[in-house]
Amino acid sequence: MCGPALLNGDDRARIAAFNATFRQVSVSPFGEDDEIGMLNLMDSESIQRVLSEADYGKIFDLAVDYFIGMPSFTGGGDLPFQQWMSHTPSGNIIDDPLRVGKPQNELVGYSGDCIAMYTHCGTHIDTLNHFGYRGQIWNGFSEKDHLGNRHWNVAGADKYPPIISRGVLIDVAALHGVDMLPESYGIGERDLNDALRHQGSSIRTGDVVMIRTGRMTMWPTPEYVTNEPGINREGAKFLAEAGAMVIGSDNLGVEQMPAADPENWEVVHTYLFSEAGVPILEVANLEELAVERVYEFAFVGACLRIRGATGSPIRPIAIPLRT
């Protein structure tokens, strides 16, 4: 079967998108304390099932490298990726920072470095406290009650479990016979449905859905970050109601930019986080999967457990399923 799988009553009850109200924060179907939204669709049975179906002969790495000058959200004033040496072998001989003396510093070649970055830099996952409506985020948590001086006290990256699930690549660029979709192209329901049929793929409840726009063919040029093609609200709603647990893409921000909604510059983010409870994965390298036409796979990835963080780097891998 191609396209979304038919949902039973139990599935529909667990998918927040079916009870979402336009521009209103949703109450979680998983209870008043829920901080991870649709990641609750993953359980031991679903993990065992997908891992048992995986063919471990080849593993695809979906992450990009981190390096100084890499494209990121600097246009909004956020910190670019920075890296610097804190210890060098010759510097240790001169400065003797550990007070061990010159002979030991000449013997022991010690190197160390530091990094600083916006948490939404490189291949990363967004958490449900990243965007909300009118001072509230997913499940009714509020800025007033849950945001401290340094970070949110709810719904942060530290709450996200390792993600092990069935994954689906939707290659919209290939559907249209192009290497990359045009600038600011909005991917809606028809594109997604047609691409699934073209591939012979299906979406099931609890899937990680990755959308290929072809934008990664521009990485790491500065143009990568401007006027991105991506899903619009209609496309996001289609995937959320199909049961997607995580939605990712090969562009910087998943969604069409600039947004088509004149009242909301981040229409997909606010919908997926606040209304549908679906995390987002950004800057995924999907090119190798597309070349080898690997459309269904086991997805494995874990973010850093940074307390309260609105996002975290993630190293996702895809393992093809046995045919």
Image: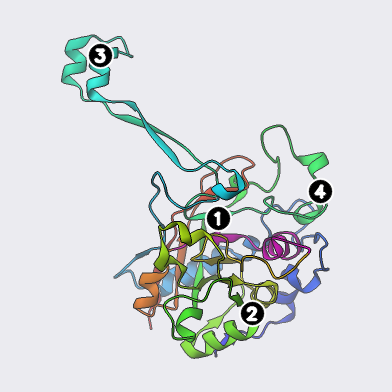
Q: What residue is shown at x 50% (from left), y 76% (from top)?
A: 181
Question: What label sits on residue 159 in the rendered view?
Answer: none
Q: Position of residue 28 (x, y in %)?
A: 77, 60
What's the magenta region? Answer: 263-284
Residue marked by disc 3: 94
Q: What residue is shown at x 65% (from left), y 76% (from top)?
A: 235
Type of amino acid under label 2: Gly
Q: Is mark 4 on a helix, strand or loop?
A: loop
Residue marked by disc 1: 125
Q: Image check: 140 left or right of 172?
A: right
Type of amino acid under label 3: Ile
**Please, is residue 272 above or below residue 116 in the view?**
below
**Please, is residue 83 above or below residue 165 in the view?**
above
**Badge 1: few (under 14), some or many (20 or more) residues near its Cα, within 10 Å?**
many
Q: Image check: 99 left or right of 49?
A: left
Q: Is mark 2 on a helix, strand or loop?
A: loop
Query: Which mark is in front, 3 or 1?
Result: 3
Q: Position of residue 257 (x, y in %)?
A: 62, 65
Residue marked by disc 4: 135
**Please, is residue 267 above or below residue 148 in the view?**
below
Tags 2 and 4 touching, CB below 8 Å: no
Gap between marks 3 and 2, in whole Å?
A: 60 Å
Gap between marks 3 and 1, in whole Å?
A: 42 Å
Q: Is mark 1 on a helix, strand or loop?
A: strand
Type of amino acid under label 1: Ile
Q: Image check: 242 left or right of 52?
A: right
* Residue 283 in sight: no
Question: What label sits on residue 188 in the rendered view?
Answer: 2
Q: What residue is shown at x 79% (from left), y 49% (from top)?
A: 141
